[in-house]
Image: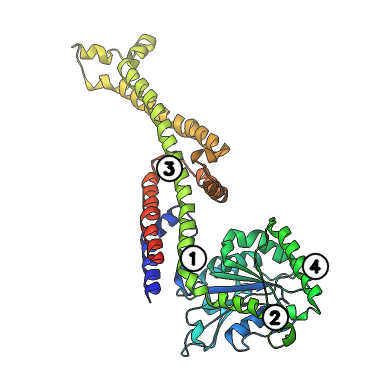
Amino acid sequence: MLESKLQIEIQNKINKKIAPLFSKYNMDFSGLESSMKWKPIVLIIGNYSSGKSTLINEIIGSDVQRTGQAPTDDSFTVITSEGSDKPQEVPGSTLINDDNLPFVKFKKYGEKLTSHLCLKNIDSPDFENMAIIDSPGMLDATTEKDRGYDYMEVLGEFAKMADLIVLMFDPHKAGTIKETYAAIRNTLPEKSGEDRIVFVLSRIDECDNISDLVRSYGTLCWNMSQMTGRKDIPHIYLTYSSDVANSTKAEDNLWPQERTELIEKIHAAPTLRLNHILEDIDRQVNELYIVCEAMTEFTKRGRKLFGKVGKTTVGLAIGLFCFGDVLTNSLISLPKQTLISSLRGEGFSFMNLIIPLIFLCGTLAIGVVLFNNFGFKRLLKNTLSDSSQLVKLDNEYRRHLWKKMAATIDEHLQKSSAKDIWHAHSSNLVKIRRFLDGDLKKYYDKLRS
């Protein structure tokens, strides 16, 4: 109950203080909204024969998903307990149009995805505060069929929402699937933290002996080192189907212990929810911060340049206001009486101000035109040539953050005009910093207490 109240409090604070700033900088806020809106999520992914459905059925305690070594389900299936008064199955068209659920953002992927998205409502107290998402089996290049939507992009969106991602392999295809490679190499690192990913070698009961198991395990480790680009390999859980496993094998090895630890880890996912919400907020607000920081520095440089141009222009304008008519009088005998001579008592009239005011206003106008068309554009061009100069990249975290947000910052710069140097980026920066140092830190402290 306390965690639920804290989650609502965080959501209200974000919507009030931070959401408007995401909107101002045209940054996607849907990821934060989704993570705060619903219950904890476990995402199960893997190739079509990796044992996803078997594991899900065992966790739930009933045969909710069809199983088999051939493809049995090509949908993203959300499995949870919504109450007996709700339909047992909810189609994707309903899910993407329900603002109380985190699936509205999937509407943009079209009918192909919508028709392959559904929610199964099961009668289980354990799933009242938890959901499992079963995913379509990953495919290889030689068997790839057009799904009608960008599978890896959709998978990335689900990964952003998930508190735990279980990536499953079978001993016969230990990481050789093309989409598995893309997921491990690009999609999952970009959309989720490494601490949220669990690797599982399933169906080990199908290995004839320990040598076969070692061979499959070694192959998976080697493939993972190629996919991750790292030599250190994370823990790989071993599991099997309890219905078909040889009981003698299970007793003589550590299989049951591995399998039990995996299932306990999945059931513990809800306890990580608030921490993951804060991590997501921390990450995305820092992304917003560095964008705002870069734009603040750029506008400061723009105003500084405007000040230099302005001083020169105003000085020249005042000089021409005072003596411009003297120059025109000497060249073309206009006006007959200059402003200075009229002020000396030779008959001042409003007509004596016409040419000086033309010089004054004309010079100021030319100064503005020169700044807009030359000074500002030159500043923008120089900035875009190396926009990283706008912020201090004095540690690895800042460099990683810049690498991720550089394209967004450049896009904002390219859309900038001279009038944008007066935008209140600095006050936005203060608001973001105050949230990170104050509100977010307070929520972390509450979570630890």
Q: Amino acid at mark 3?
A: Thr
Q: Which residue is at 59% across, 62% downward?
A: 194
Earlier residue among tags 3 and 2 = 2
| Closest to the observer, 86 or 248 | 248
Residue shown at 70% from the left, 88% from the top: 243
- The residue wearing badge 3 is 296
Q: Which mark is residue 276?
A: 1
Label 1 Cα neighbours within 10 Å, binned few <14 / some 14-19 / many ≥20: many
Number of other residues with Cα within 10 Å of mark 4, as a class: few under 14, some 14 to 19, many 20 or more: few
Q: CA distance from mark 4 to mark 3?
A: 50 Å
SS for callout 4: helix
Colour mapping: rainbow
Q: Give percent across and percent down for residue 277.
A: 46, 65
Q: Inspect the image, locate mark 1, and give the three-letter code of the amino acid beneath it.
A: His
Q: In the rendered structure, which amino acid carries the disc numbered 4?
A: Thr
Which element carries disc 1, helix, strand or loop? helix
Residue that appears at 50% across and 34% down = 379
- Reply above or below: 447 against 51: above
Q: Can the viewer see residue 143?
A: no
- Give how far apart the Cα atoms at labels 3 and 2 are: 55 Å
Q: Are marks 2 and 4 in contact (CB under 8 Å)?
A: no
Measured as percent of width and height from the top left, residue 300 is found at: 41, 37
Looking at the rendered structure, the secondary structure element under dot 3 is helix
